[in-house]
C-alpha cells in the first residue's frame, strides 16, 4: 500500500447514493475520502499562495471588497497547520497488539 494512505484513520470515507440522478443516467454517486494523500495538494496550494502573496498579486481586489491583509496571513497559517496535522497522521505509528494501556 502507498505511504500516502493511512488505513486506520477513523471516519475517513464518506459515500452516498444520490436519489435524483443527472439526466439520462439511472443513478449517481459521490465519493469523498479524507486521507494523507491530500497533504501534497495542500502543500502545493500553500506554496502557490505564498508566491502570489509575496508579490501582493490580486490583493487590491480583496482589500477593495473589505478584507484585511491579516486575514490572508491567518489563512496561510491555517493551511500550514493543516499540512502539519496531515504529516502527523502520516507519521503516526499504529499499535498492532491492540493493547489499550491508557
Image (tube, rainbow, N blue to C red):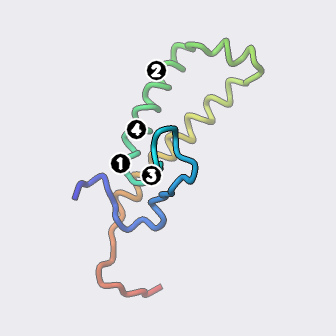
Q: Is residue 60 left or right of residue 100?
A: right
Residue 74 in percent (x, y) is at: 63, 36
Residue toward you, 38 or 78: 38
Residue 37, numbered circle: 1
Residue at image location 40% in from the left, 54% down from the top: 35
- The residue that mark 2 highlights is 51
Is residue 43 placed above or below 83 in the rendered structure? above
Q: Which of the marked residues, 2 or 1, is nearer the chain's N terminus?
A: 1
Residue 41, numbered circle: 4
Residue 31, numbered circle: 3
Residue 75 in percent (x, y) is at: 60, 35
Q: Which of the marked residues, 4 or 3, is nearer the chain's N terminus?
A: 3
Residue at image location 29% in from the left, 79% down from the top: 96
- Labels 2 and 1 touching (C-beta < 8 A): no
Q: Is residue 62 left or right of residue 98?
A: right
Q: CA distance from mark 1 to mark 3?
A: 15 Å
Residue toward you, 54 or 20: 20
| Residue farthest along the left direction in this orientation | 1
Q: Which of the marked residues, 3 or 2, is nearer the chain's N terminus?
A: 3
Residue toward you, 27 or 80: 27
Residue at image location 34% in from the left, 61% down from the top: 6
Q: Secondary structure at mark 3?
A: strand
| Residue farthest along the right direction in this orientation | 66
Q: CA distance from mark 4 to mark 3?
A: 18 Å
Amino acid at each position: 500500500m502507498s505511504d500516502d494512505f493511512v488505513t486506520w484513520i477513523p471516519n475517513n470515507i464518506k459515500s452516498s447514493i444520490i436519489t435524483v440522478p443527472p439526466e439520462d443516467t439511472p443513478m449517481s454517486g459521490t465519493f469523498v475520502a479524507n486521507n494523507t494523500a491530500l497533504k501534497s495538494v495542500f502543500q502545493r496550494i500553500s506554496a502557490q499562495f505564498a508566491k502570489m502573496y509575496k508579490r501582493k498579486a490580486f490583493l487590491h481586489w480583496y482589500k477593495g471588497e473589505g478584507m484585511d491583509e491579516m486575514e490572508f496571513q491567518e489563512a496561510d497559517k491555517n493551511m500550514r497547520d493543516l499540512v502539519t496535522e496531515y504529516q502527523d497522521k502520516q507519521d503516526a505509528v499504529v499499535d498492532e497488539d491492540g493493547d489499550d494501556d491508557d
